[in-house]
Amino acid sequence: MSASAHRPRRSCLYMPGANPRALEKAKTLPADTLIFDLEDAVAPDAKIEARDTVCDAVKAGGYGNREVVVRVNGLDTEWGLDDMKAAVAAGPDAILAPKVIDGGDIDRLDDAMSRAGAPDTMGLWVMIEMPKAILNIQDIAEAVGRTRLSAFVMGTNDLAKELRGVNDPPLRTAFQTSLGLSVAAARAYDLLAIDGVFNGIGDEEGLTAECHQGRLMGFDGKTLIHPSQLAAANKIFAPTDADVEQAKAVIEAFADPANAGKGVLKVNGKMTELLHLEEAKRTVDVAAAIAAMDS
């Protein structure tokens, strides 16, 4: 697993690309990732101006150690290819593409990034928000071996529309199959998995519950629509102090020469197998990355 995989993505905040003040304010917000949006957050008649605004902001920088991602319009739209060219030239950490449905879409997006001059280090994130994407989730994930694909971002609002499902946060009954399959595919192919948005701005209890649900399901973090949601996501998707201490104890126990060759140990009263060692190391690495970012 690459070092970038341990980079915190607890909070991934959408910022409307047509709002220069919001892009400037983002420089002061405690978000792990900023997603500058050219798609859903921008009206058709404002798309071109928003593209220029976002790309100028990315080029100018000033976002510190926050990860910067640009969500472009789909390649099948009138803005998509120009979005891709301009966004790649601006130099964000990753491009986020909407409404993919199969592995062929990933190949086309990766090719478009290459033609636009994207370096190999620029990631490709994709929205998982269409029923066909869920049915083809393994085909999409398998593209990681031949493309820049690095993250799944759940688009639960679009999924609700396409599935004709009723959103009942924090249970999210209609999404359980889609969320579970997406996390499974992400883990099988070493991709990031970012949970969908919570629409209730000001509903702290609902947001907290939904963040806890996403964390329990295995998501790395959550997409957010308002700065007021940052604190909850940053807290819930971070390892707790108890998690870190237990992880360190597991690492120390397996490093003890007296335990050489043992596959199962008792650590602080808990049965711990060798398979837990990798997760313990990841927990410590993530906690260290969060501490470095917060400092």
Image: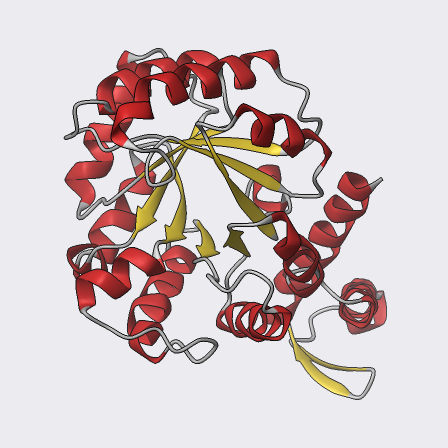
Above or below: residue 196 compared with residue 112: below
Going by the image, does 37 lie left or right of 277?
left
Q: Which of 212 and 264 is in front in this view?
A: 212
Q: Quadrant of residue 203?
A: bottom right
Q: Position of residue 29 (x, y in %)?
A: 70, 39
Q: Quadrant of the C terminus?
A: top right
Q: In which quarter of the image is residue 134?
A: bottom left
Q: Position of residue 259 (x, y in %)?
A: 78, 73
Q: Nearer the viewer, residue 141 or 35?
A: 35
Camera sees residue 131: yes
Extreme residue in the front direction = 45
- Residue at 72 percent across and 50 percent down: it is 285
Going by the image, does 34 lie left or right of 50?
right
Going by the image, does 220 lie left or right of 55?
right
Above or below: residue 290 compared with residue 73: below
Camera sees residue 118: no
Going by the image, does 7 lie left or right of 288?
left
Above or below: residue 289 compared with residue 263: above
Above or below: residue 283 compared with residue 103: below
Q: Colour scheme in the image?
A: secondary structure
- Residue at 32 percent across and 71 percent down: it is 175
Q: Say how many tags the image has.
A: 0
Q: Position of residue 85 (x, y in %)?
A: 32, 14
Q: In which quarter of the image is the N terminus?
A: top right
- Residue at 51 percent across and 68 percent down: it is 214
Q: Where is residue 194 in the image (x, y as percent from the top left)?
A: 47, 54
